[in-house]
Image: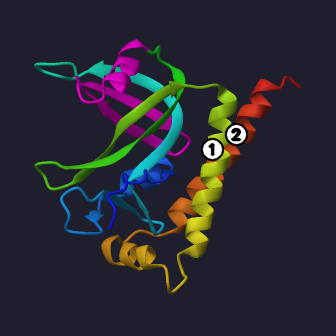
Amino acid sequence: MSQSAPTREVARRVFATEFNDATFTFKESDDERAPVYSLLPTGERANRVFIVGTLTETEDVGEDSEYWRGRVVDPTGTFFVYAGQYQPEAASALRDLDTPSYVAIVGKPRTYETEDGSVNVSVRPESITEVTADVRDRWVVETAERTLERVEAFEDEGNEYARRAEEEYDLPLARYTEGAIEALESLDEEESVEQPA
């Protein structure tokens, strides 16, 4: 087998509600370099995610060195993004960006078990880019489409990640269908506010 460079995983579009529910992670092999996947409750694995939303808050929560936390809000909820010395570009973006502003983020899902046993899910960003409202709106539409496609494919018997999600999560899929529809409706509401009658 030739040592080819590992291909970068496709970044999944996912809304905050579903992302924050994706508390189960796994690897497909025992190789220590094997990618870690987050299991999305709609039956898809995600090693990388692509999110767009409003950066509402940034804070340096590091003790010895800079470690930036950002809150990014989409129509369904909030993502938490953390970047430190190993993500210098993302960290400086969090340091320099004004809030509120629209941002597009590609990053890896990270899970962290708290002392009380609950699991927090966050994004470790590879890149953070300021974007326009149009880009944000397009992301909402496309993410809603992807979410509804995953829900539709969930019942397919051969969908191994859906079967796994059934085992790992006790979550109604309707939650994500409704979230996607509400996210689309929120765009219509914004447009009607912007267009004076």
Mark 2, residues whose alpha carbon is within 10 Å: few (<14), some, or many (≥20)?
A: some
Is 79 located above or below residue 19 in the figure? above
What amino acid is at disc 1?
Val
Left or right for 89, reference 32: right
* Residue 69 to residue 38: above or below: above
Q: Considering the image in quadrants, where does the N terminus appear?
A: bottom left
Q: Residue furthest bottom?
A: 157
In three-dimensional space, the C-alpha distance between marks 1 and 2, rounded to whole angstroms, equals 8 Å
Question: How far across and down, in percent of the image, does residue 179 sit?
Answer: 56, 54
Q: Earlier in the sequence, mark 1 or mark 2?
A: 1
Magenta residues span 67-96
Percent position (x, y) of residue 88?
A: 31, 23
Q: Is residue 5 rendered to the left or right of residue 128?
A: left
Callout 2: SS: helix
Question: Which residue has dot 2 on it?
Answer: 187
* Residue 39 in sight from this viewpoint: yes
- Name which residue lies at 30% across and 20% down: 59
State the mark number for residue 140: 1
- Numbered circle sitting on residue 55: none
Residue 182 in view here: no
Q: Nearer the viewer, residue 14 or 10?
A: 10
Position of residue 159 relative to residue 44, above or below, is: below
Residue located at (77% from left, 33% from top): 191
Q: Quadrant of residue 153?
A: bottom right
Position of residue 114 measured from the top left corner of the image (x, y, whole percent): 16, 48
Specify the amino acid type for callout 2: Leu
Q: Are marks 1 and 2 in contact (CB under 8 Å)?
A: yes
